[in-house]
Every structure is written in structure tokens, then in C-alpha cells.
Amino acid sequence: MLKIAIVTGSTRPGRNNEAVSNWVYHIAKERKDAEFELVDIASYNLPLLDEPMPPLWGRYAHEHTKVWSDKIASFDAYVFVTPEYNHSTSAALKNAIDYLYREWNDKVAGFVSYGGHGGGVRAVEHLRLIVAEVMVATVRAQVLLSLFANFENFRTFKPAPQHEKELNAMLDQVIAWGGALKGLRFETAEKAALAGE
Ligand SMILES: Cc1cc2nc3c(=O)[nH]c(=O)nc-3n(C[C@H](O)[C@H](O)[C@H](O)COP(=O)(O)O)c2cc1C
């Protein structure tokens, strides 16, 4: 069974992220074709990247990085729930991604975003480029939530019914690709073991 993390994208006090991420989690966990866990970046208390070595080497100096590394390494796929900040994702999510490298490699991600009229679409476009560099494949289907249409007073999350269908369509793609990439990771690990690495 694939293990999929729903990763929050905001650490701001009073964030809308909590309601959106909880909505994603509650729908996802009804599925029988994968296991889901909510991973809240806020509870990992990551400072602005403070590791002396590049993440590619995986030689972490700090306990907060080791804890984050173990958590992210334990998943096959990710659903990033991102707000749009100045036409991009949040600095907090970018920082959390920057901390690691191999933990993300050869895995798949899908996106749920929220923001003004665009529903966070520009944040996801940026995020796709960012995660490509850590070798995460991204699925086409995504969920865009407008603060005007899906929140009351920009604060109380009231998603329109069609978004549940969109969310499940995105999860279908994440699970399909996640299964394919799990096979690739297995083959790579087997080759490395045979080569004595
Ligand atoms: C610093 C900042 C910049 C923002 N820039 C944008 C933006 O460029 N486009 C947009 O649609 N919404 C923008 N917003 C609105 C946010 O998407 C909205 O406030 C959202 O609720 C923020 O997520 P959070 O509450 O989970 O932190 C911005 C909000 C903040 C705080």
C-alpha cells in the first residue's frame, strides 16, 4: 500500500491552510487504495535552512533536519497544500523542501492550492518547477480553490461540491504514478545493493 503525505504549506498564525489540509485529509483517508497522513510543516519548527552541508550529501548536523528527513523519507508520494504568496508558494514550504534531497527523489506529487481569483494557480506553477529539481514527478490534475468562491469572508472554508471530485481525480493520478515510481525506486535500490554501495 502506498503511503502518501498531505503536506501543509503555511505556518502563519490564523492560516487558512489548516482547514484546507484537513478537508484534503478527511476525503483522502476514506480511500482504500493508499494510506494517508497529514504532515504539518509548522510542527517541525524548521528554521531558515541552517545546514552547513548541501542536502544532496544527506549529512545533517541538526536534529530538526534528521526528524524532518525521517518523516519525508517514509512516504511514497506527496500532496502539497499550498497558499499563493506573491504569485508563488510560501517561503515556509520552499524552505521545508530545500532542507532535503534524496528523501524526495523518484516520487510523485499532486497539488491543492488556494488564493484569490486564480485559486493559487501561480503558486502551483512555481512549485512544480521547485520539486522537479528534487526529482519529484507531478501529476496534471490539481485542485484550485478561490478565496472568493470557497471561503466565507476569506476565512471560513466552504468548498463547492465539485472540488471533492477534482481532489479524487488528482489522488487517482498520484496513486497510479506512485505505484510506477515505487517499482523504479526498488530497482535502483537493488542495483545499488548488488554494486555494494
Ligand atoms: C504575503 C502574502 C502574499 C499574498 N499574495 C497573494 C498572491 O499573490 N495571489 C493570491 O491569490 N493571493 C495572495 N495572498 C492571499 C493568500 O493566498 C491568502 O491570504 C491565503 O489564505 C494565505 O494562506 P494561509 O492563510 O494558509 O497562510 C497573499 C497573502 C499573503 C499573506
Image: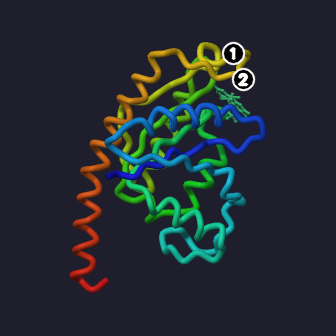
Q: Residue at x 38, y 30 (%)?
A: 168
Identify the mark at residue 155; answer none if there is no mark.
Answer: 2
Which residue is outermost to the right? 13
Work out whether 178 lies above or below 60. above
Residue 181 sits in quarter = bottom left
Q: How many marks?
A: 2
Residue 17, image x, y percentages: 64, 35
Q: Which quadrant is the C terminus positioned in?
A: bottom left
Work out whether 165 lies above or below 49. above
Q: Quadrant of ligand 1?
A: top right
Q: Which residue is mark 1?
A: 152
Secondary structure of the residue carrying numbered label 1: strand
Label 1 neighbour load within 10 Å: few <14, some 14-19, many 20+: few
Say which of 148 and 90 sits in front.
148
User: Which amino acid, by three-letter code, is at mark 1?
Assistant: Glu
Residue 100 located left or right of residue 166: right
Secondary structure of the residue carrying numbered label 2: loop
Proximity of marks 2 and 1: CB atoms separated by less than 8 Å: yes
Residue 184, image x, y percentages: 25, 59
Queried on whether the Cβ of the residue with tag 2 lies below 8 angstroms from ligand 1, the answer reads no
Residue 119, image x, y percentages: 56, 23
Work out whether 149 lies above or below 47. above
Q: Residue at x 58, y 75 (%)?
A: 60
Q: Residue at x 51, y 44 (%)?
A: 6
Say which of 108 and 27 sits in front.
27
Identify the mark at residue 133; answer none if there is no mark.
Answer: none
Residue 164, image x, y percentages: 45, 23
User: Which amino acid, by three-letter code, is at mark 2?
Assistant: Arg
Residue 152 located left or right of residue 5: right
